Image: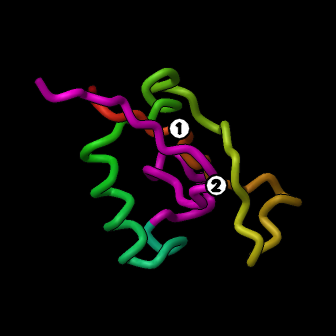
Amino acid sequence: MPVLLQVLIVGDLNIAATQQDVHNKLDREVMYPKHEKELFDSILTEFTDVWRKLHPDTVNAFTVWDEKTSARAFNEVAVCPSPLDSPV
């Protein structure tokens, strides 16, 4: 009988899962390289964004700032999901 394990991915992921997780002055499509978005999107097909599952309608709750634009000083930021939960 196979053993099913639940897996959590936690850490400093540095990418917003969706545009909903990004300040309205920012654009997720230009914030991250295409290959990073594609990889992260593929991870989200297998794992659940726990923050978004628990807070599906929450807006303006951010956890990462774009340091290239000094966004922290203006609170123009994005939320990085953490942790990600496997479906088991």
Query: Hey, which residue is sitting farthest front in the picture?
Result: 1
The quarter of the picture where the C terminus appears is top left
Q: Is residue 10 magenta?
A: yes
Q: Is residue 21 above or below residue 57?
A: below
**Secondary element at image label 1:** loop
**Which residue matches tag 1?**
83
Closer to the N terminus: mark 1 or mark 2? 2
Question: Camera-side residue: 31 or 51?
Answer: 51
Q: Is 1 on the left-hand or right-hand side of 11?
A: left
* Residue at 68 percent of width and 44 percent of height: 62
70 left or right, relative to 19: right
Q: Is residue 30 magenta?
A: no
Disc 2 secondary structure class: loop
- At x 88%, y 60%, the residue is 73
Q: Write down the region rendered in magenta.
A: 1-28
Q: Is residue 9 above or below residue 53?
A: below
- Across and down, in percent, residue 15 comes to 54, 59
Q: What's the amino acid at mark 1?
A: Pro
Q: Residue 58 appears at what percent x and percent y?
A: 56, 28
Q: Position of residue 38 (x, y in %)?
A: 32, 67
Type of amino acid under label 2: Asp
Look at 37% across and 77% down and name the residue there.
Answer: 34
Q: Which mark is residue 12?
A: 2
Q: Please give the name of the residue rendered at 45% of the width and 78% of the height, measured from the top-left corner.
A: 33
Percent position of residue 3, x then y = 23, 27
Q: Which mark is residue 9?
A: none
Local crowd size for mark 1, using a 10 Å CA cut-off: few (<14), some (14–19), many (≥20):
some
Question: In terms of image quadrants, where is residue 49?
Answer: top left
